[in-house]
Image: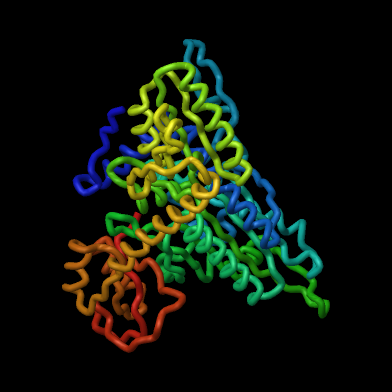
Amino acid sequence: MSKGITSKNEDYSQWYNDIVIKADLAEHSSVKGCMVIKPYGYSIWEKMQAVLDQKFKDTGHSNAYFPLFIPKSFFSKEASHVEGFATECAVVTHYRLKNDGNGNIIVDETAKLEEELIVRPTSETIIWNTFRGWIQSYRDLPLLINQWANVVRWEMRTRLFLRTTEFLWQEGHTAHSTAEEAIEETTRMLDVYADFAENWMALPVVKGVKTPNERFAGALDTYCIEALMQDGKALQAGTSHFLGQNFAKAFDVKFTNKEGKIDHVWASSWGVSTRLIGALIMAHSDDAGLVLPPKLAPIQVVIVPIYKSDEELKKISEFVNELMSKLKRQGISVKYDDRDTQRPGFKFAEYELKGVPIRLAIGGRDMENGTVELARRDTREKNTVVQDGLEIYIPQLLEEIQENIYNKAFEYRAGHITKADSYDEFKELLDGKAGFISAHWDGSPETEQKIKEETKATIRCVPLDNELEEGVCIYSGKPSTQRVLFARAY
């Protein structure tokens, strides 16, 4: 199987695209800016969904579903929100087509909507309009809702998984009786995302808060998890927003508290999307293709028989079927590829490209010797191991691979968080080593914007575990109380 993958050191962007296409994760669709997520790519998203969905339910949330279309007037109710999304909105203006008499299908100009509908870029407005009818008293709170959905944000420059006009995500929306409860919810969900990123995606992240310039439109505070990709660029892997009472006031969502007084509720919203698949690819993969953490791999173990006769295949298959049943009972996903339409070498290349963590090859001689050939995807090492006890060894090895993938990403990040104490040093690091640059900033949006315009680097976050440190801003020379993390980002 010819992989034809560009080396990531040669052209990182092309390397990424090659893996997405050749590993059968997704492809460009006939609709500009939109993608088709193929079965293998979608199965990774399904594994992510299953884990996150359970985490949401374990923290008291329930799933619901709200309309795809949002009346335009809803957006005008929260000024900063509409300003933040106005340039990305797709608008529905008519509800019918007709034949023009010449065989052409055109929009029926008489079927104009009384009010235009926005295809949801996010659901705060439609959900808060609905919450008004659900909340009357403190007994109705907290209201903890999650939605799995698709959203549309009109993008001029798109990239599979990372930035497409339509993408899949989940969005949590919650209502609380106090600001403290809403903030606690916001940080709790940030911790859920960080736990998922580190323990399932094997992706080390920095938890932090966004600056006002980078804050979600309509939020008082945006918390985030930031990850570092192998090209030294950052990727925002999840956000959680403290919305204060902004949306409750915009949509008149009030409740009677325990003292009998009427007040507006306090809110949070939070979400992650299919860009996590892009993060998974860019953080771990190599020039041979995908490298998947075992916990999110659709196929954790693949077994390839190598045989010269039907009798040999029968003996191999008997052993394999018994091993598979033992592994499946432990929740391990196993595939036995006994196709006779492809040679073993083709299959080896295919599963390496698709990032399957463990590959077993078993031939006639292996059956005689009581051994198998085991190849692990993370290190590409091959070893001959005994058949006895494989059902014990494989689960342990999957855990070891998961940990090794995380450690490799952690070591890369640790080597790419660098302090800069001058603007020249900052720019030199950006163009050379890249990664996160820890530098002093004077706290002003103007300085942040100028640095962004001149270098294309943004403040990714103010880390939550930051230590206060007296210094001067690298750009303005004004006093600063702490360093923040800058990076160029996706």
Q: Which colour scheme is used?
A: rainbow
Residue 290 coordinates in the image, percent (x, y): 37, 43
256 or 117: nearer the eye?
256
Residue at x-position 49% and y-position 27%: 316
Residue at x-position 43% and y-position 17%: 309
282 or 476: nearer the eye?
282
Give the answer, above or below, for where 17 lies relative to 368.
below
Q: In which quarter of the image is residue 405?
A: bottom left
Residue at x-position 50% and y-position 59%: 199
Quadrant showing the N terminus: top left
Determine the residue located farthest toward the bottom in the rendered image: 470
Q: Quadrant of residue 430?
A: bottom left
Quadrant showing the C terminus: bottom left
Residue at x-position 69% and y-position 63%: 252
Give the answer, above or below, for where 151 lies relative to 241.
above
Residue 236 coordinates in the image, percent (x, y): 42, 59
Residue 265 coordinates in the image, percent (x, y): 69, 69
| Left or right of residue 398, residue 289 in this image | left
218 or 116: nearer the eye?
218
Give the answer, above or below, for where 201 lies relative to 451.
above
- Does the rendering let one see residue 269? yes
Determine the residue located farthest toward the front in the rendered image: 368
- Does the rendering let one see residue 31? no
How many dots with numbers? 0
483 or 396: nearer the eye?
396
Give the answer, above or below, for where 341 lies relative to 275.
above
Residue 127 coordinates in the image, percent (x, y): 65, 54
